[in-house]
Image (cartoon, rainbow, N blue to C red):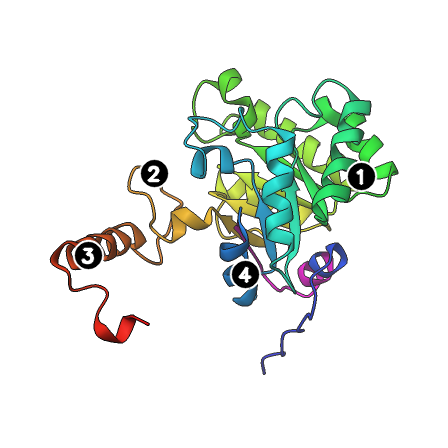
């Protein structure tokens, strides 16, 4: 006999921990603007990540590093105005928390006050321990992020799978337990072996959300533009496309242009 899943009118950080405890998987997608966020929220996605991936997706940068705190606040505030149910997590951008816990707190406070977001996400483990502690002590929820950390791309030099070697796997597990001990409410694991990710998820009471981390974790996150097929260049193994919007949108634009040039648009019914 199956047990009915609990329904949540509004997702909170506590909701996610509760979902893990009851074996309910967590869905998470990105959004950077009001229109997309409205659709994602309406689809009952549990968590919306206002990711620094906006640097790639919205601005065309090669990495996530160029995006600024002001830009993240702009994107996050647009998303906040759209939602009625989803929990909104906002990435702290590169350079705003790594070196100075006081700067980290000021940056997190700005995100919470100026955007209305519900939590911040930070990449790294023991090396950013003091920044995480200071933010948590101010009452701001923190989601951790381990494994492939895109803000450190120039350190690693590649977007390959992380923690395949024993030493790095041990550090990842140690950092995951540290983040939980510090008080993080959830953890993202990106591009790590599925067996390791499952082991981490089973070792923690907080939810572990994977991207390229297998099916043994507590939830999944994808970049919305990727899963909608709005790009053709990005084809990682972990990505499942649910639409082919690139070709569909291109076809619509071409048909619109043809109708304008032929004089078919607007028709009599489309005029005042």
Q: Nearer the viewer, mark 1 or mark 4?
A: 4
Q: Earlier in the sequence, mark 4 or mark 3?
A: 4
Q: Which residue is drawn at 26% across and 76% down?
A: 269
> Relative to residue 100, is residue 251 depicted above or below?
below
Determine whether label 2 and label 4 are within 8 Å by CB.
no
Q: Is residue 106 above or below residue 86?
A: above
**Magenta stretch bounds:** 17-31
- State the separation of the CA atoms marked 4 and 3: 30 Å
The residue wearing badge 1 is 181
Separation of disc 3 and disc 1 at Cα?
Answer: 61 Å
**Residue 11 colored magenta?**
no
Where residue 260 is drawn, which disc sits there? 3
Cα distance in 3D space between marks 1 and 2 = 35 Å
Q: Is residue 183 depicted above or below 254 in this figure?
A: above
CA distance separating discs 1 and 4 = 34 Å
Does residue 263 appear to the left or right of 114 in the view shown?
Answer: left
| Mark earlier in primary sequence (1, 2) | 1
Badge 3: how crowded within 10 Å, few (<14), some, or many (20+)?
few
Query: Which residue is denoted by mark 4 in the rendering?
Result: 38
Q: First in sequence: mark 3 or mark 1?
A: 1
- Determine which of the numbered discs, if any, sits on residue 124 in the image: none
The answer to if 29 sits in the magenta stretch is yes
**Residue drawn 56% across the image and 32% down it:** 147
Tag in front: 1 or 2 = 2
Residue farthest along the left direction in this orientation: 262
Which-is-in-front pick, marks 4 and 3?
3
Front residue of 81/270: it is: 270
Residue at the spot of label 2:
234
Label 2 crowd bin: few (<14), some (14–19), many (20+), radius 10 Å:
few
Q: How many labels does the image show?
A: 4
């Amino acid at each position: 006999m199956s047990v009915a899943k609990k329904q949540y009118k509004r997702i909170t950080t506590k909701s996610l921990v509760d979902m893990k405890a009851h074996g309910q998987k967590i869905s998470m997608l990105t959004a950077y603007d009001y229109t997309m966020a409205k659709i994602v929220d309406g689809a009952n996605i549990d968590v919306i990540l206002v990711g620094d991936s906006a640097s790639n997706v919205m601005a065309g940068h090669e990495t996530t590093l160029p995006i600024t705190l002001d830009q993240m606040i702009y994107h996050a505030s647009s998303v906040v105005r759209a939602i009625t149910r989803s929990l909104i997590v906002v990435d702290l951008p590169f350079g705003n928390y790594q070196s100075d816990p006081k700067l980290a707190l000021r940056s997190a406070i700005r995100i919470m006050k100026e955007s209305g977001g519900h939590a911040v996400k930070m990449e790294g483990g023991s090396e950013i321990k003091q920044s995480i502690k200071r933010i948590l002590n101010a009452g701001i929820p923190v989601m951790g992020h381990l494994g492939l950390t895109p803000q450190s791309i120039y350190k690693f030099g590649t977007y390959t799978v992380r923690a395949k070697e024993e030493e790095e796997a041990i550090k990842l597990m140690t950092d995951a337990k540290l983040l939980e001990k510090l008080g993080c409410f959830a953890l993202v694991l990106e591009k790590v072996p599925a067996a390791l990710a499952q082991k981490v998820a089973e070792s923690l009471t907080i939810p572990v959300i994977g991207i390229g981390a297998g099916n043994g974790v507590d939830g999944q996150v994808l970049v919305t533009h990727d899963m909608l097929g709005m790009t053709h260049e990005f084809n990682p193994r972990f990505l499942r496309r649910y639409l082919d919007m690139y070709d569909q949108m291109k076809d619509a634009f071409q048909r619109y242009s043809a109708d304008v040039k032929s004089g078919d648009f607007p028709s009599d019914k489309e005029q005042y």
